[in-house]
Image (cartoon, grey):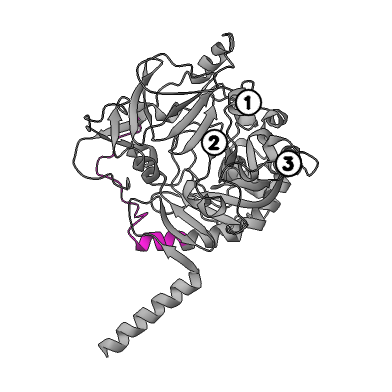
Amino acid sequence: MLATHFLSVIKAYFEYMHYCEIDYVIKNPQMSVIVSDSRGWLVDSQSFINDNYSSCHDGFMLQDANNTSTETYRFKKEYFNIFMPHIVSQPKSENVETKTSEDNLTVLTGGVDAQKKKGRKRKRDLNQGELDAQVYHEKIRLLVQEGAGSLVDVGKSLGYLTGAGPAGAPQTSIPQECHLAAMCDMAKSLPVDDTVASQSICGDEELDLFSRVTENSSDHSCAVTLMGERYLLPARCRFLLSDITRTHPLRNCGEKFDLIVLDPPWENKSVKRSSRYSFLPSTQLKQLPINLISSPECLVVTWVTNRPKHQRFVKEELYPHWGVKPLAEWLWVKVTQAGDFVFPLDSPHKKPYEVLVLGRYHCDENVTTSSCLPHDCNTFSKSEAPLPDQRLIVSVPSTLHSQKPCLSAVLKPYISPNPKCLEMFARSLHSDWTSWGNEALKFQHISYFTKDTTDESHSTGQ
């Protein structure tokens, strides 16, 4: 009887795995990808960051072979301590119908009770942008609900997303004030030396961070002082501090990239009202020299807000302008440490997901410039996995503004081996990547990290 029961449990388990179409489950808690299936990935962003700084030198010590002293740094856990949704879904009252989009707007503005207190207000019609957003949401709603639920359930079975917070968890500290963008503006008044496009960190010499691509060529991460501030640089990273008016060092450094990820500061009403965040008009994105820095078949990935207007602009104007063919849309689904959506899935205000538009750069058949010629061994191989559509990346987001999960692990099957990767409008650095933006060092400031004083290897941050 016991053996029969055991076999039935095993059979039920494999049937469940087959139902969920699980491709593989990663049980190593130090890996950034916790679960992968045919619908997407459950990833641990904090573990990915921490992996870069498990063996960090104090200063640049490439030429000091006798000095093997290293330290371990971890990104502060508090920035991922999201244990409750930002907005809790309200149960529907039996006496209140909420079937229409107009009723959703009523809930957003304070609910029926609040409306009665303030007096009856005339409902307004949804504008075209809101109608388009509603149509898009209905199209992907089931995918988000079922796909994210499947990934989260498997993650919980592995002990991830347990929802348990540390006892007496500290409040989130105030982030370091960032002056990098202002410094980039001031650097525009300085003369530019175009004779040297890149430089390496190899000592205490003064570096031009604003008109040269700067590299940590070491195989170790290091803590260095730049412009009077301490920063952590991952191994084999490169970066350029500049804005859209100064991209020529990227063009001049001689690199052709196999993967380009962009996270533009999209223009919207809330950003316009706030003086804390900068934004860029959509049309200015066409100035980026994507065609000059892309390898043949370069994979281009753009983070887009949930406004259909921006999504259409990327697919119908921006990508064609660059010579990029749109091929797929993915979604980043944001969940709490308990696996709940950070916002109600059907919230009329904010959704718990963001969109990524993926495409490949194709040279114009009539163009014979060097940008369309194969470069060394990184030419795209047709044997690579075809780019799938409608995939989910599920993770606990950071509480820091615009800190996105790194896409290295999930994009690996769709790019060439040993790829050259570029992040544009970056706010952090990654090993084996080039990062460009006027705040590319922002989340590398040592104030975002804590030094590990134990002998234990870095944890997942749960």
| Disc number for residue 272 | 1
Nearest-to-viewer mark from 1 and 3: 3
Q: Residue at x 57, y 24 (%)?
A: 274
From this view, report whether residue 152 is shown above or below residue 219: below
Chief SS of the magenta region? loop
Residues under labels 2 and 3: Cα distance?
Answer: 18 Å
Q: Is residue 162 located in the magenta-colored stretch of the structure?
A: yes
Which one is in front, 226 or 281?
Answer: 226
Three-letter residue code for mark 1: Lys
The answer to which image quadrant residue 127 occupies is: top right
The answer to which image quadrant residue 429 occupies is: top left
Q: Earlier in the sequence, mark 2 or mark 3?
A: 3
Relative to 88, is 379 on the left or the right?
Answer: right
From this view, report whether residue 85 is shown above or below residue 289: below
Report the residue marked by disc 3.
323
**Boundaries of the magenta span:** 151-173
Nearest-to-viewer mark from 1 and 2: 2
Question: Helix, strand, or loop for circle 3?
Answer: loop
Which quadrant, please, contains the N terminus?
bottom left
Residues under labels 1 and 3: Cα distance?
Answer: 30 Å
Where is residue 216 drawn, in percent x and y?
Answer: 41, 29
Which one is in front, 440 or 219?
Answer: 219
Report the residue marked by disc 2.
423
Q: Residue at x 42, y 76 (%)?
A: 14
Q: Residue at x 56, y 57 (%)?
A: 144
